[in-house]
Image (cartoon, helix red, strand yellow):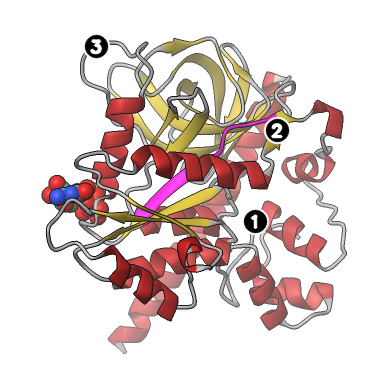
Amino acid sequence: TEFISANDLASLLDVSVNEIISTCMSLGMFVSINQRLDAEAITIIADEFGYDVEFTKDIEEEIVEEEEDKPEDLVERAPIVTIMGHVDHGKTSLLDYIRRSKVTAAEAGGITQHIGAYDVRTKDGHKIAFLDTPGHEAFTAMRARGAKITDVAIIVIAADDSIMPQTKEAINHAQVAGVPMIFAINKVDKPNANPNKIKEELANMNLLVEEWGGKYQSQDISAKTGQGVDELLEKVLLEAEILELKANPNKNAVGTVIEASLDKGRGYVATVMIQAGTLHVGDVMVAGSHYGRVKAMFDHTGKKLKEAGPSTPIQILGLSGAPQAGDSLKVYDNEREAREIANSREQIQREQSLRTKKHITLDEIGRRL
Ligand code: GTP
Ligand code: MG
């Protein structure tokens, strides 16, 4: 029963495949009829229909066995925020402004290296973790893999422009994923800026902003002058408060891979958002089909860390390869177990890629005929 298609799962659960697909949608996963589902997805979907899944392989058993946290073990955690919007509307400028002016003074001099995630402390000392997803594709890819790591989405819209196709796409992504949105109406320093026109366009899409009596928070900002950025961050914190974000910091770390690559000097480097538990140097981890011991970890300023708790984005050295964006990272007490899980995942991936290859070949033959 590992890696069955959405269609097969439907017949196993005795529901229509459309029900499977729409359930997946509501969970923020896009699947097609013949798409094969991984253990995590199968477990989640089956649960929606009231089934407990029992898998035969070790790798899947651990997913079933994962225990829930006791309420008394949960503590508040910082929100994880993704910034989305149309090309050139100012996402990077906003991120740059926030990073430049808000990053704690502890930041070591020199150039801040680009990593896909970083954390920021507001003037009054609250932490916010930002995800710098370069495009919607990464966001979609992660969600399709069942990773839900965004708590709040900031949708940037240029006030000298209109709601554009990618703005709509971003809004749609956030809505499907059930992530609350805050509209950042940007470039208000420009003489031809017209934030009211944007709010009107939003209203026409049934997205009435708060100052007009609706439920959506919005903030006029300029990523260039910094106007409104503090207020925007306050609104993010307000939204986070409503969500009552919590995690148990006192267990083996669980996180999601944002990006990973091979660095010639340092080996495989993975940027990971820790979501629960605390990761320590020396911990044995599995990320996707790779494993290893945490050799070193760094925050987004390049500062070495000994440990990292919930909602902390970090770079990790020590994995045996580069996992994919959206892969989960987990800590295990036992190195042998970690290796076995990584190896069996690798084998499944290999089998899958063989299948894909076969499919492509057949398709090409078909076209030639
Ligand atoms: P992509 O990454 O290409 O999707 O664009 P982006 O959304 O990251 O936009 P970016 O931050 O690169 O900004 C695009 C252009 O708009 C740049 O030339 C910025 O300098 C300019 N810009 C961004 N924000 C503001 C603003 O608040 N005021 C003014 N006047 N210009 C801005
Ligand atoms: Mg950009």
Is residue 278 visible from the viewing direction of this image? Answer: yes
Q: Hey, what amino acid is under mark 1?
A: Asp
Quadrant that contains the N terminus: bottom right
Where does the image place residue 152, in percent across and percent down from the top left? 52, 49
Q: Which residue is mark 1?
A: 38
Q: Nearer the viewer, residue 119 or 186?
A: 186
Dominant SS in magenta? strand
Instruction: Determine whether the residue tagged by mark 1 lies in a helix, strand or loop.
Output: loop
Query: Looking at the picture, which amino acid does disc 2 mark?
Result: Ala
Query: Which residue has dot 2 on it?
Result: 247
Mark 3 vs mark 2, CA separation in Å: 32 Å
Q: Is residue 267 above or below residue 367?
A: above
Q: Secondary structure at mark 3?
A: loop
Residues shaded magenta: 76-84
Amino acid type at circle 3 is Gly
Determine if the magenta segment contains residue 137: no
Whole-percent x, y for residue 209 in the image: 47, 65
**Do tag 3 and tag 1 residues touch (Cβ < 8 Å)?**
no
Q: Cα distance, mark 3 to mark 1?
A: 44 Å
Earlier sequence position, callout 3 versus callout 2: 3
Q: Earlier in the sequence, mark 3 or mark 1?
A: 1
Compared to 26, does 333 lie above or below?
above
Give the position of the C terminus as an image quadrant.
bottom left
Secondary structure found at label 2: strand
- Residue at the image position 81 percent from the left and 49 percent from the top: 56
